[in-house]
Amino acid sequence: MGLQGVRKLKLELGESAMVIGLGLLGVFAAQLAAIDGAIPVIVSDFDKRRRDLALSLGADHAFSPDEENLVEKIKELTYGKGPNAIVEVTGAAVALQQALTYVAREGRISLLGCTRIPDANIDFYHYVHKPGVSLIGAHTFVRPNVESRPGYWTAQDDYRTLLALIAAKRLKVQPIISEVVSPECAPAIYTRLAEEKQPPLGIVFDWEQIR
């Protein structure tokens, strides 16, 4: 799904990109935006550990969403324009509202996070219609079942791409793994993921640990 969020933006070499939210999907999206030729790649997340991880994996700049003068800082890094393309991964309406203050005129925002609660007052005329911004749904359910085409790849073709990038050591997975546990721990792990404010980033179930 992280690849889906980047693919929908149809990045061109040299365009600037931003990823808002550095959960598992966001960390992958930041790496893939860099692989796709975006420069700079800017990321934002409240968790410093995740920001540092993204920087170690190829992001160029990292910020906390509550940082002072953030809009000005981001525009300074993008020649005064704002990012050409943004992946919004938090699913929070306020994050989309914030993304619309960053994005360049005629920029694109892929909605990779599932924004189910419309709890932010977004001025669509001022921030979307007037500057010609494109909001792109990037849910995995819109994938084609059989044949890939630009911006719309099948799950099988995307899996093949990801595995090839990992095999070529262009996409790094090992640093994202926080814990390796037995599948017998699954109930406790999913409880942590649901309840902890900053849960572990990447947890791998090692099936060989089952006795």
Image (cartoon, rainbow, N blue to C red):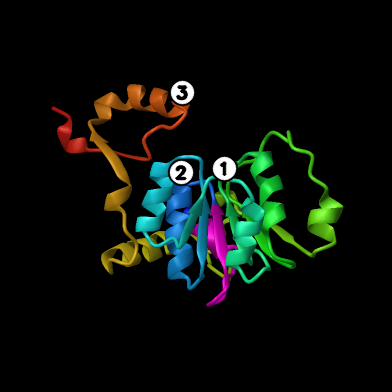
Q: Residue furthest front?
A: 68
Q: Are marks 1 and 2 in contact (CB under 8 Å)?
A: yes
- Res 159 → quadrant: bottom left
**Residue 103 or residue 110, whichever sits in front:** 103
Q: Which residues are magenta?
A: 3-19
Q: Residue furthest left?
A: 211
Q: Position of residue 142 (x, y in %)?
A: 61, 54
**Element on which disc 1 rests:** loop
Amino acid marked by disc 3 = Glu
- Spatial separation of the CA atoms under disc 1 and disc 3: 16 Å
Q: How many marks?
A: 3
Q: Amino acid at mark 2?
A: Gly
**What residue sits 46% from the left and 58% below the top?**
30
Q: Which residue is mark 3?
A: 195
Checking the image for residue 90, the label placed there is: 1
Question: Is 188 contained in the magenta span?
Answer: no
Relative to residue 164, is residue 111 drawn left or right? right
The correct choice, above or below, for 10 with respect to 1 in the image is: below
The residue depicted at 49 percent of the width and 64 percent of the height is: 33
Distance from the alpha carbon under mark 1 to that under mark 2: 8 Å
Residue in view at x 79 percent, y 65 percent: 132
Above or below 84: residue 124: above
User: Which disc is residue 205 wearing?
Assistant: none
Across and down, in percent, residue 182 comes to: 22, 31
Based on the picture, tell me whether residue 5 belongs to the magenta stretch. yes
* Circle nearer the N terminus (2, 3): 2
Q: Could you tell me residue 10's position as x and y percent?
A: 59, 69
Where disc 2 sits, the SS reads: loop
Location of mark 2 (residue)? 23
Quadrant containing the C terminus in the rendered view? top left
